[in-house]
Image (cartoon, grey):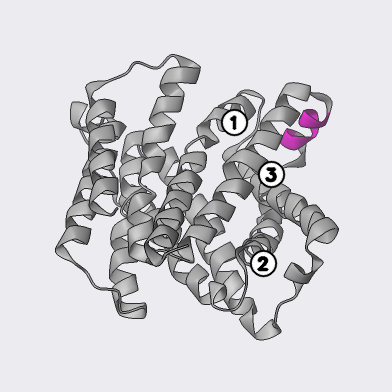
Amino acid sequence: MTEQKKKTAAQLQVLLGASLWGLIGLFNRQLTAGGFSAQSIVTVRNLGGLLVLTIVLLLTRREALKIQLRHLPIFFGTGVVSVIFFTLCYFRCQQIASLAVAAILLYTAPAFVVLLSALVFRERITRRKLAALLLAFLGCVFVSGILQGGLSLSGTGLLMGVASGFFYGLYSIFAPFALKHYQPLTVIYYTFVFAGLGSLPLLRTEEVAPALHSLPLLGSVAGLVLIATVLPYLFYTRGLAGVESGRAAILASVEPIVAALVGIAAFGEPLSLGVVLGLACILATVYLLR
């Protein structure tokens, strides 16, 4: 495979991973209707990911479980600093601000990644990358529908929203350090070792227990863990091995587009002009970064 084909394949994996993340609302709505709080969803997602990856690796790739203790701080970064902190800040922002505002602030992440990648990895900040970054952010603005109404945001909401974008973006900074030493499966597994165990204090057993007796809720849990967590992290992390971190973070902005389309297809939400404009912006972003 030529170098260009490898880069294209890596970019497609990033896009596929981000698209699968966009399906998370499909399962979250079912779990929320079944009595799950945001904290319980986060815990089930992280612990479920850890359980699935442990079983898969024990049965098929035990060699992927081997790491050096000196690299544990990297996985603390991907699992706790990124996955857990981002989720807690994001859900807190959703509680004190509108969902649209929370989504827009979350997608400050690519800007953080581009800047940090320039400092940490010496990635060039090109005009094309800046144009793609602007288009991706505009796409998220259009999809959120925030332009159709007023903006009301407290200082705490702003802080939590920007923090969620910062911690979300840090996965694209920490993961490349791990990928220098380990295959993507190992990186993802130890990310969820820290994310899963670190989420335990958030677990609310009285909310999760009813799912054990409900096939629809169990199906939603399985979908959340397998389709919207394990697989997207696998594809995105594999993509990071062949794509600049800043470029990958910008491409991942396809996630809110997919989420909006899921709402239209699965829940009958209207197809707004904002979704169409957002889709056009994201497609233009992918073209710029081809």
Q: How many marks?
A: 3
Q: Is residue 164 above or below residue 123?
A: above
Q: Is residue 163 left or right of residue 146?
A: right
Mark 3 or mark 2: which is in front?
Answer: 2
Instruction: Give the SS element for disc 2.
Output: helix
Of residue 219 and residue 240, the one placed in the foreground of this image is 240
Q: Which mark is residue 44?
A: 3
Residue at left 40%, top 61%? 7
According to the picture, the residue beneath numbered tag 2 turns out to be 186
Queried whether the magenta region covers residue 67, the answer comes back as no
First in residue order: circle 1 vs circle 3: 1
| Residue 212 occupies quadrant | top right
Instruction: Give the SS element for disc 1.
Output: helix
Residue at left 78%, top 71%? 63
Look at the image and give the residue range highlighted in magenta. 207-212
Residue at left 45%, top 54%? 9
According to the picture, the residue beneath numbered tag 1 turns out to be 27
Mark 1 or mark 2: which is in front?
Answer: 2
